[in-house]
Image (spheres, rainbow, N blue to C red):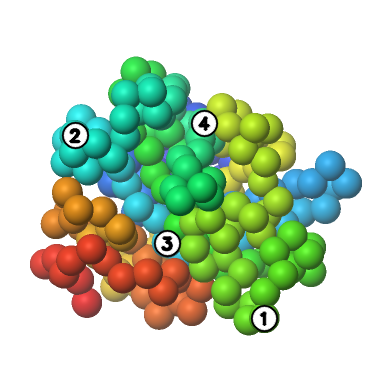
Amino acid sequence: MPAAVQAGEPAPSHFAGDPVSIARALLGATLVRVLDSGERLSGRIVETEAYDCPRDPACTAGRFHAARSAEMAIAPGHWLFWAAHGHPLLQVSCRPKGVSASVLIRAIEPLEGLGQMLTFRPVTRERDLSNGPAKLVYALGLNPAQIAGTRVDSPALHLRPAETPLADDAVRVTARVGIKEGRHLPWRFTLRGNPWVSPALPSMAVVGDG
């Protein structure tokens, strides 16, 4: 979360900024899903990626066509979904309304509600439950039609900041995954050594990756 946010769910206004900085700050935060029954499912965010169309070659190369880009250009601090290979990926909108920019949440480490998560997404290895962007959406039982466009401090799905900011040596910075243009940009952040980080490989090596 932005450094100014120390407690409670951050307000949407805290996301009206640089998605790269916000992606880094989201590491270590907790994503909380509250079911209709009141049961809490939560996970620590261990992997994020930034997308910033005003300066992102991945956008100008056609990654976001006009209609979908417009969907991303909503007010900051709201949930949105991008579909990849037919699977929904959870993102947080950034920057002012009208600008397409977001942070993709790529992986979480389960904290609460593991049994229910395994019901939503049965797997043989628990590590495979939420170590990818589509996986975590299914593990949390998220319905994009119900969640898209809601605020990041909504009761059904919200964020809790990390108790203490992560030190730089606890964070690995790499290129993003699965892109052709803009693959040189160091806009993917992972919690170093965490087993729940996705097994996907960065699109290329970048300075500082290691």
Label 3 or label 2, whichever comes before in sequence order:
3
- Direction front: furthest residue: 85
Residue 202 placement: quadrant: bottom left
Local crowd size for mark 2, using a 10 Å CA cut-off: few (<14), some (14–19), many (≥20): some
Q: Nearer the viewer, residue 170 or 187?
A: 187
Label 1 or label 2, whichever comes before in sequence order:
2
Question: Mark 3 and mark 1: span between their CA atoms?
Answer: 22 Å
Label 3 or label 1, whichever comes before in sequence order:
3
Image x and y of residue 124, in percent: 67, 81
**Residue 162 visible in the current orientation:** no
Amino acid type at circle 3 is Glu
* 180 shown above or below 171: above
Amino acid type at circle 2 is Thr
Which mark is on residue 60? 2
Using residue 19 as the reference point, say whether residue 144 is left or right of it: right
Question: Mark 2 and mark 4: span between their CA atoms?
Answer: 23 Å
Q: Secondary structure at mark 2?
A: helix
Disc 1 target residue: 124
Which mark is on residue 78? 4
Q: Secondary structure at mark 4?
A: loop
Quarter of the image with the C terminus in it: bottom left
